[in-house]
Amino acid sequence: MKTGAKILVESLQREGVDILFGYPGGVVLPIYDELYDSPLKHLLVRHEQAAAHAADGYARASGKVGACLATSGPGACNLVTGIATAYMDSVPIVAITGQVPTNLLGNDAFQESDITGITMPVTKHNYLVKSASDLSRVIREAFYIAGTGRPGPVLVDIPKDVSTGLAKDIPLPEKVTLRGYNPTYKGHKRQIDKAVELIEHAERPLIYAGGGIISSNASAELIQLATSCGIPVTTTLMGIGCIPCDHPLNLGMLGMHGTEYANFAVTESDLLIAIGARFDDRVTGKIDTFAPHATIVHIDIDPAEIGKNKRVDVPIVGDVKAVLQDMLAILKKNAMYEPWIKKIRHWRQHHPLRIKDDGRLHPQQIVRALSDLVKGEAVIVSEVGQNQMWTAQHFCFHHPRTWITSGGLGTMGYGFPAAMGAHFARPDVPVFDIAGDGSIQMNIQEMGTVAANRIPVKVAILNNMYLGMVRQWQELFFDRRYSYTELPPVDFVKIANAYGIDGIRVDTPDEVLPALKASLACDGPFVMDFRIEREENVFPMVPAGAAINEMIGGHPRT
Amino acid sequence: MKPHTLSVLVENKPGVLSRVTGLFSRRGFNIESLAVGTCEEPDMSRITIVLIGDDAKVEQVMKQLHKLIDVIKVSDLTENERVERELALIKVNAEPGTSRAEVMQIASIFRAQIIDVGAKSVILQIIGDTEKIDALEKLLRQYGVRELVRTGRIGILRGSKTVSGSK
């Protein structure tokens, strides 16, 4: 017989968890006691939200399931933003929470919250474990559900008497069978034939590549599909990295802050192949005018995404990798779209992303300098807002899983803790958090975690003393009425120093490269406070509700 | 926009009903009626949901329901030949004398049963489709309906076909 806590810790190890991000508390004491002399590594964060984001960052960078642990009540509630972030971006994490003993459930006991009820809308599935003998099965199922099909977060709530209760350690079958859960992996043959036929007959095809390509580890297949026929590719925010930025067929990001040429290509395409993407409003703009001339093929593992926002002509439900492999097997390989490629090349020449070089410190320069310095061999995490969009536009990503950002939920404060998690997945490369002065202050307490554990996360704060993206909208759409978006100056280097972290303040373009090099030379965490042009905007931009080819801040249409 | 009757086979576990109803509210789907009970499989339950929406919306509801791990099968009965029934208990004013006689007459026309008789009221039990119950309720309203309880609609396919089976 073993205690529930011991069964839990052993189960986590059996699932391949090599690090648990967590924060202790009353009802998880038995679990923490078990962790005390377990080989399972645990990272003590400074706020539970950071534990969830760290598990998420770890999962995105590694492709494995991330795990976090918190106590009941406030601890569990603090995980919610992190769980919701993972849910919106289909990231596999398992969140373990403590719960009050079963005999007190529903009694408003001290630090009780109905966390399975609270997280129902933001988890793929969740469990309230009622008996220690269920624990090993539940943990197995939780990891299976999180990591298969369309990935997502799973929460396991464990009452205190379940972790102290005794149960026999029954060996589990290797294979998990759940009669209500059978994801479709293989695409429908006839639909695949149809898609291939459309590709062979199209004149202006375009691949709209989403995060599903990254979760499915299908970058190689995607690149093969694009290059074998010469089909241009535009990626969503989540799809960045699935094809190298400097690949001649890569048009960069589409949508609200996409490149003009990507958005023009969508609007003029006659065949749009959406792969692992979900026609989000930030991508499509006004949905009726999105790809108005295109036949649409949609490949996704989640049948509920098909036809949710946009009617599609050829739906293919299945794992992106498997479907692409099936398509490649029957595709005749020859480049067929010369006039189309030429047209796109023309747009690209006349509508490049702009970057100013006027002696002032512009954020785009900083992102490009970092990009040139690390040459794609780093994990870049962002916060949310202007910092995120500048990075998405100007950093040159070469590999999948090297760009980590909160896309669907848009969670400020995500980046710094996610970067900590990413480090444990990729200790071999530097990890940068590109932050704004607003976002970094949402989880700035994690300086304590990176300092105490010498986690070498490099934080580049693009400091404009504004909540920049909101300010930009106020400038453009609210008559420059900067309602509560100005932030007083903060000396981030001093804050870093107080935690025992080195940092540097940068005011001029000349200081950028030396600062970035100094951050790489430092073997621990490092903070860079870049005092950028305060009212720099993210352009081009599709105003909310407009068609995606109606961009502001771009070039005159030629 | 027409009413659809969805038959949803679920694991008989705590919390399943709130997963299903929570999904409806957060995705903005309105439930017209809902009935839950055990079914032919001992460890499963069947939820019958009636909702009004266009076909695209109903298709999205079904796909979202299907994504719930505890949901085993979702079928739209509306697509098929089916029998649908609902039960209602109606407590209606029926003073001895003329109104009581009239109420009892209406009951007999509708093949409703009188299952309780009080000093000033009677309780009617009626089984039928939604329209029939609506019609009876409308007729009884002139006498004063004190209380009305409806089970929500349930349905089953005609013939030997069933909706059960694995996903």
Image: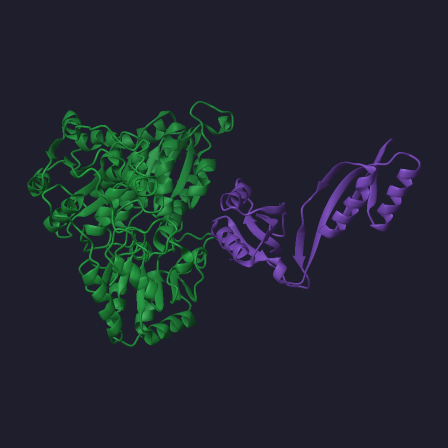
The residue at the far top in this view is: A110
Q: Which chain is green?
A: A
Left or right? Give the position of A511 relative to A66.
Answer: left
Q: Which corner quadrant of the image does residue A555 belong to?
A: bottom left
Give x and y (percent) for residue A429: 15, 47
In the displayed structure, A498 sits above or below A527; it is: above
Where is residue A73 shown, x and y percent of the image? 41, 28
Q: Is residue A75 above or below residue A88?
A: above
> How many dots with numbers?
0
> Is the N terminus of chain A in the top left, top right, bottom left or bottom right quadrant?
top left
Q: Residue at x 49, y 26 (%)?
A: A104
Which chain does purple denote in the image?
Answer: B
- Quadrant location, the C terminus of chain A: bottom left
Q: Could you tell me if residue A129 is visible in this image?
A: no
Relative height, residue B154 to residue A192 (above, below): above
| Residue name at image x 42 percent, y 25 percent | A111
Visible in this render: residue A243? yes
Frontmost residue, A194 versus B45: A194
Q: Nearer the viewer, residue A20 or A6?
A: A20
x and y, in percent, of residue A469 in the image = 28, 41
Colour setting: by chain
